[in-house]
Image (tube, helix red, strand yellow):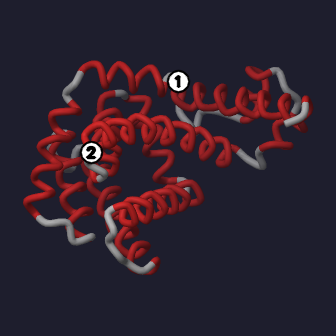
Amino acid sequence: MNIREANATVIKRRIIKISRRLFLEQGYDKTSVRQILNKSGLSTGSLYHFFKNKEELLLSGLHDALLDISRLTDKIAVECQEPLLRYALDVALATCEIFKHKHLLNLYKAISQTESVDHEVINIKVNKMKKLLNDLNLHFSDKEIHSRILAIHGATKALMMATINEQLLVNPEDIYSLIINMALSEFNIPKKKIAKILLITSKIIKDEDLSRNLKKKLKP
């Protein structure tokens, strides 16, 4: 990487970090490109050199956050020698953190309501599930994986939004348990195995060190 490329990478990361902080602090809808420019000290041309619109900034920030969560859950899954924990902990951590912090709740709603970003979230979930199934030596076609993830994603959004809008009174553990059970059942994981995964997941999620570590990683 030459000096120009290195500088470009630094600038791009700075823009993502600033936009992510503003999205979290004041909400996606209330954050303008102008505010991001003012905070970053960049010209309009500099910003649009890297990102074509605010949606791309939201997506980039989301990618970074999901990567941070995945690094954490992958490490735990390796330590426990249980690949399924990668999926279960991703779901559980995201669900618990969203309902724990209002700014994350608002960001989740913005992501869900932004079609291009929501579509990319589905693609991320599909690719992660493909890797997990490959590690487990379970064979599904790309079409089967995509259709199942699409159904799970739709059900997850409906459940989350109903809870957010207080149309459904459940706690985060009920939500992530239902999602994990539904998803793993779709990919033919035995019920006894799912029950074991849920038990381990619930225990890990209650670890205060994990919560502090995640908060540190996700801090913009």
Among the 4 quarters of the image, the one containing residue 33 = top right
Q: Residues within 10 Å of mark 1 (few under 14, many from 20)?
A: some
Task: Please tell me the numbered disc located at residue 25.
Answer: 1
Say if residue 165 shows up in the picture: no
Q: Residues within 10 Å of mark 2 (few under 14, many from 20)?
A: few
Q: Residue at x 43, y 41 (%)?
A: 70
**Is 37 situated left or right of 97 in this image?**
right
Percent position of residue 105, x then y: 39, 36
Spatial separation of the CA atoms under disc 1 and disc 2: 37 Å
Task: Please tell me the numbered disc located at residue 81.
Answer: 2
**Labels 1 and 2 touching (C-beta < 8 A):** no
Q: Secondary structure at mark 2?
A: loop
**Is 63 situated left or right of 14 in this image?**
left
Task: Please tell me the numbered disc located at residue 101.
Answer: none
Q: Nearer the viewer, residue 72 or 53?
A: 72
| Amino acid type, callout 1 | Glu
Quadrant in the picture for the C terminus: top right
Percent position of residue 90, x then y: 35, 44
Q: Residue at x 13, y 66 (%)?
A: 190
Q: Secondary structure at mark 1?
A: helix
| Amino acid type, callout 2 | Gln
Q: Nearer the viewer, residue 202 or 15?
A: 202
Q: Is residue 12 above or below residue 146?
A: above
Among the 4 quarters of the image, the one containing residue 209 = top left
Q: Is residue 111 above or below residue 31?
A: below
Query: Which sits earlier in the primary sequence, circle 1 or circle 2?
Result: 1
Q: Is residue 106 above or below residue 10?
A: below
Percent position of residue 69, x then y: 43, 37
Quadrant in the picture for the N terminus: top right
Q: Residue at x 67, y 33 (%)?
A: 16
Q: Disc 1 or disc 2, which is closer to the eye? A: 2
